[in-house]
Image (spheres, helix red, strand yellow):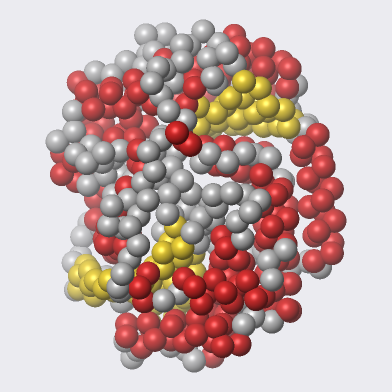
Amino acid sequence: MKPDYGMTGIRIFSFLALFLASWCISISAHANTHEFLLDNGLKLIVKEDHRSPVVVTQVWYKAGSIDEVNGVTGVAHVLEHMMFKGTEKVPNGEFSKRIAAAGGRENAFTSYDYTAYYQQLHKRHLPMAMELEADRMHNLILTEEEFSKEIKVVMEERRLRTDDQPRSLLYEKMMAVAFQSHPYKNPIIGWMNDLENMRVTDAKAWYDHWYAPNNAILVIVGDVDAKEVFRLAQKNYGAIPAARNLLPIEGRKPQTEPAQIGIKRMIVKAPAELPYVMMGYHAPTIRNVTTDWEPYALEILEGVLDGHASARLNKSLVRESQIASAASAGYSATARGSGLFFLSAVPSAGKTAADLEQALRNEMARIISNGVTEEELARVKAQVIAGHVYQRDSIFSQAMQIGRMESMGLSHRDIDVILEKLKSVTAEQVRDVVKKYFNDDSLTVAVLDPQPLERKAPAKIPGGLRH
């Protein structure tokens, strides 16, 4: 599924204590967060955190697989790989060597909604990291020779992480069926046929169009002075020209998924030890942080169903009825496109996929009939708040939280608004979203039909495989 689902292993504190903690941290966070806009359109967000002499620097581009077109699926991820191939000033491989020599770590990741690059290192090396990142924003060298090597690495990554992983393969096939027209139907890594036929000119076109300061957010969190970081940003990024004819997220053409008008079912046959059932319901995501309420109720619902030992799916399906050996729920309230709420489970020995589907349906019907208790609601809210509070313990998590919000067309200042909205969700609202969205007309059911496993030698991960 999409990353960032679930909050397992969170200790439960009193709701009041967590409310006070989140309130105090919220005041501190706003006091130490500074926002700047360079003349070329680059947005800089600096959050000062002086607890240790470390800094995280991240550049987020508001371009992911959602922005791709048919025939070049996977190009956003391919370019992410190519971004490490060097510039005239910094030859191939030198970027990573310099960060490693400074005792830092670096990597990158591509999502449906964005692409991001990061470094974490001692604060004295921030000028070097910013110089390196700014250089490849504008001066990347893309050659046929390097591209022909790296595209093979990406294809092998696809084989290792999707084609040879039955649950990942099931998810990919399910997304392609659940979405009729929206780009989320295409895998982030791309379809193999598109990768096989991709050219260096495709990567260059993507780079030239999307990799520009007016399509990027620079996030710096750590033991820094905001004014000094702004000076460094102007020095390193200020001369990079803005891209012309580049629309902001809110100005891009809407890609609204047509309403589903009947249940969709599919079976995927793949070598695996056990069956697996995945059910995906179309659900809304946040469009207006202050007036929306359904995405917040759905996020609380996810916590009711999953995320802790006493959550409903684990308690009812795994421990009590023992119809499943594992069960989970997944939902993300923030996305540039349409949302899906996932229910998934592995049947216990002697149980069928049909048995499991019915058990999952029964759990949702029970919420419609009986609702959720106030005790249950308070416990889940405590978990949600705890998750937000504990993210502030890590400078990397703080930067990730800011970058995700900004790259999806929201504001980092909405983080605390979202927290307040989650705290205000009622039991009746949770019940209402189940009634509205958990019906067959919006449902896709995917079942993994396990085939005999072949004995293979362990696959060797190629040296160029990142993240």
The part of the image, by quadrant, that contains residue 156 is top left
Q: In the rendering, at what x and y percent does residue 284 appear?
A: 49, 59
In this rendering, is residue 384 above or below 279? above
Quarter of the picture holding the N terminus: bottom left
Residue 248 in sight: yes
In this rendering, is residue 356 above or below 285? below
In this rendering, is residue 127 above or below 316? above
In this rendering, is residue 205 above or below 152? above
Picture mark count = 0
Q: Residue at x 47, y 30 (%)?
A: 248
Q: Residue at x 46, y 11 (%)?
A: 241
Left or right: where does residue 383 sit relative to residue 318?
right
Left or right: where does residue 24 sit relative to residue 465?
right
Q: Residue at x 73, y 55 (%)?
A: 420
Residue 464 in sight: no
Q: In the rendering, at what x and y percent does residue 106 appear?
A: 50, 32
Quarter of the picture holding the C terminus: top left
In this view, the residue in front, 395 or 265, is 265
Q: In the rendering, at what x and y percent does residue 419 appear?
A: 70, 54
The part of the image, by quadrant, that contains residue 203 is top left
Left or right: where does residue 113 sit relative to residue 127?
left
In this view, the residue in front, 56 or 42, is 42
Q: In the rendering, at what x and y percent does residue 271 appear?
A: 22, 68
Q: Residue at x 46, y 71 (%)?
A: 437
Left or right: where does residue 138 sit relative to residue 198?
right
